[in-house]
Structure formats: C-alpha cells, structure tokens
Amino acid sequence: MLTSILKGLFLISATGFASMLSYGKLFVFKKKHPAFVSDYCATMAGFIAFYSIFALVLVWLLPLTSEKLIMFGFAFSPFMLGLIATYHTEKYFTFIQIILILLSMAFVIIK
C-alpha cells in the first residue's frame, strides 16, 4: 500500500516536472518578464526536488539491487545532466532529460 502511494506521488511529480520543463522550454524562457520567469524556475525547482526525493525513497523500497541502481540514476539525472550541459548544448540535454523522465515513469509503472 505504501509503495503504491509513493509510486503515485513519484508519477505525479515526474509528470509535473516533464510538463513544466517542456512548457518552459517552448514558451516561458523566451519571455522578457524576469519576475514571471523567476517564479516559474522556482516552481520547477520544487518539482525537481520532489522528483528526486520520491525516487530516492523508492530506492529503499525496491527489492532488487539492479532496480535500486536504476532508480538512483534517475534520481540524480537532473543534477548530472545539469553539470555537463553548456549554453550551446542545453537544447539537447533538455530533450535527454525529458526522455529520462518518461523512462523513469515507465520503469515505475512496470515495477
């Protein structure tokens, strides 16, 4: 029961993170209103935090070591990609991050 609740919360946070990342990349980050963009980025940071925290909680609940390693990789993927992305490659890494979020959602649904 607890595992299914945490999986649901992870799926909600992953959906919010992916949709905010996509919407932000397409529309928000091109706006010239710094207060709106700043508030949007702060909200997206909250979704990143929830996504990572729920992924780390699922690491403790999954039974197999390989599943734990995969979820651990998903939990830290936004931070690892953020470290290696540059101004010129941020479009590609944004796309990779969205794909990783979708893969993590599929992984949680399957397990």
Image (cartoon, rainbow, N blue to C red):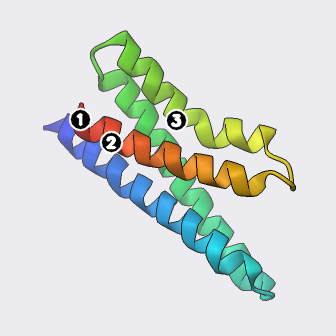
Q: Residue at x 28, y 42 (%)?
A: 6
Disc 3 target residue: 75
Q: Are marks 3 and 2 in contact (CB under 8 Å)?
A: no
Q: Amino acid at mark 1?
A: Ile
Q: Are marks 1 and 2 in contact (CB under 8 Å)?
A: yes
In whole angstroms, how far apart are the C-alphas of marks 1 and 2? 6 Å
Residue 47, position in %: x, y? 52, 57
Residue 109, quarter of picture: top left
Q: Residues within 10 Å of mark 2 (few under 14, many from 20)?
A: few
Q: Residue at x 35, y 57 (%)?
A: 12
In whole angstroms, how far apart are the C-alphas of marks 1 and 3? 17 Å
Disc 1 target residue: 110
Left or right side of 28 for 16: left
Residue 38, position in %: x, y? 73, 74
User: From the viewer's perspective, is residue 80 above or below residue 42?
Assistant: above
Q: Amino acid at mark 3?
A: Ala
